[in-house]
Amino acid sequence: MNILEFVEQIKRSLAIVKKDLSIYYMKGPVVIFGLLLPAFLFIAFALGKELTMEFLFSGLLAMALFFTSTSIGPAIAPTETSTKTFERIVSAPISLWAIIFGDILASFLFGLFIISFVLLLGVALLGMGIITLSLVLGTILAAFCFSAFGLVLSAPPTDKPSNIMMLSTLIKFPLIFISGVFIPLNQMSDGSRLISFISPLTYYTDIARYSVEGISYFSPVLNLLILSGFTTLFFAVAIIWHKKSLTKRF
Amino acid sequence: MGTKKNKIIRVKSLVKKFNSFTAVDNISFEVEKGEIFGLLGPNGAGKTTTIRMITGIFNPTKGSIYVNEYNMEKESLKAKQLMGIVPEMANAYVDLSAYKNMVLIGELYGIEKQKIQERTENLLKLFGLLERKNDKVKTFSKGMKQRLIIAMGLINDPKLLFLDEPTSGLDVESVRLIRGLIRKFNDEGTTVILTTHNIEEADNLCDKVAIMNYGKIVAIDRPARLKHIIESTSSIEVAFEKKVDMEKLKFKEVGPIKKIGDKIRLYTENPEEIIPLLFKYSQSSKNKILSINTLGPNLEDIFVKLTYGEKK
């Protein structure tokens, strides 16, 4: 594929983004699993505890970005498998990677859109100082990484969105508890901390802590590099797994 | 015999296996430019799987496919650019308007914005949907949805149009409209690949027909020539006053027996020998014959004859 063909495929990905934006943003599973559930989880965690505003906000930021960016991706493939619209898209002259990239981009934009409101809340409560370069870069990178992770979760070839949403919740929930959102990395036991390193959310939480509280476990640059690695891995795995499951979707 | 250049599709030794199940079993055929080519067969014959491989939705287990000389294994995007595809189920996005569905497909084919708008307007008008262009597809009837997905398949002005069961389950008016439009686009030079289990449709529309059963092509030719193959095969259509146990009509020299509405059709090469046996059965079972006719072969007869008894 030459550069012109590559650019053409990216353009076609944007058509996928437009379609996803029009259809999936207000779908039930997206609202429930992407907005309401994490909001209630956070409230349950925060209420009645003596925690600093900085600690609470950095945790909220990480959790909100993780849940919103991973909420649309898992809904698309099973829904479109059941409505047979996936077949329509796959039969068009667009590569599978470009379809997946489009779906990731749609999920990414949803994550960024929601997180911008959370950031505005943070600025109102804690001042402009929380908006650092590493937070901006980290948020963009993490939103893409989590969106790609969402597409990995949607690879099993089912036509029931609820199956994927359940699987997705089953995997996402434990990650919230091992990623330093509720307990900072430096307060974890060695074993728990070791487990936390397998979660991409750990590195974005660490970036958020650095920007909001001024403390972090890893350096921001290392966090960004590791997030880049996870992004590449999830994007590649999403393509490979969706390719494998394609035949079973029809 | 056409030259390679005249062949828009060349399929050779195509096999598709799903685990141990062979859905398409070593088929080969060619389609000439400008033809209406029918893939005919019962449900589960392998027609849709064949179309899905030709349209690049999934890869064959074995064999090769060339579309306009593009190898589907290596140049599927270029080949897909020439195709218009109308899958079996109405699969427009029901939460989008008819107009937005058309634009989406146009953009997936990389068509310029201005051209998408022009073609969308023209096609929606042609398919009688222009007035409803801004309505969500979920408010459309089945016939309207089907017309829309055919219009979507034509947005790129395809050289090759695939229609998978395009009139299945539609009202007479929609069927007539769709068949008329298939002929119109074919007259304008579009090659049409039609998948159907409707024999009458294939007989009326197709220049050439491949009959599939259990993943194999059991016959391929022009409908008129297929009829000649079994010119000797006739059938008897009989209606009885009361219900009949069809097992009791399996006389010697009777092939397949089908129930068609109130009538029973018996395929046989010797109707003159079977008719007395039917009257004898009528008398002995005290079940009056209401009507009896002998029929000449049609495409359905060929289909029944070629696929009857071929079970794995």
Image: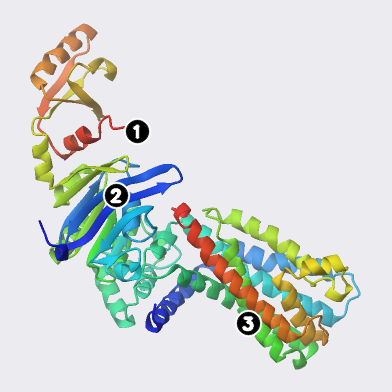
Q: In terms of secondary structure, where does tag 1 sit?
A: loop
Mark 1 chain: B
Query: B242 left or right of B92?
Result: left
Residue at coordinates 29% horizontally, 73% vertically from top-left?
A: B120
* Label ID, residue B170: 2
**Foreground pick, A156 / B190:** A156
The reply to whether residue A116 is visible in this rendering is: no
Callout 2, which amino acid? Leu
Residue at coordinates 75% horizontally, 84% vertically from top-left?
A: A122
Which residue, as the protein is rendered here, is positioned at the far right? A50
Callout 3, which amino acid? Ile
Q: In terms of secondary structure, where does tag 2 sit?
A: loop
Residue B100's image quarter?
bottom left
Query: What residue is pinned by disc 3?
Result: A140
Mark 3 chain: A
Query: What residue is pinned by disc 1?
Result: B312
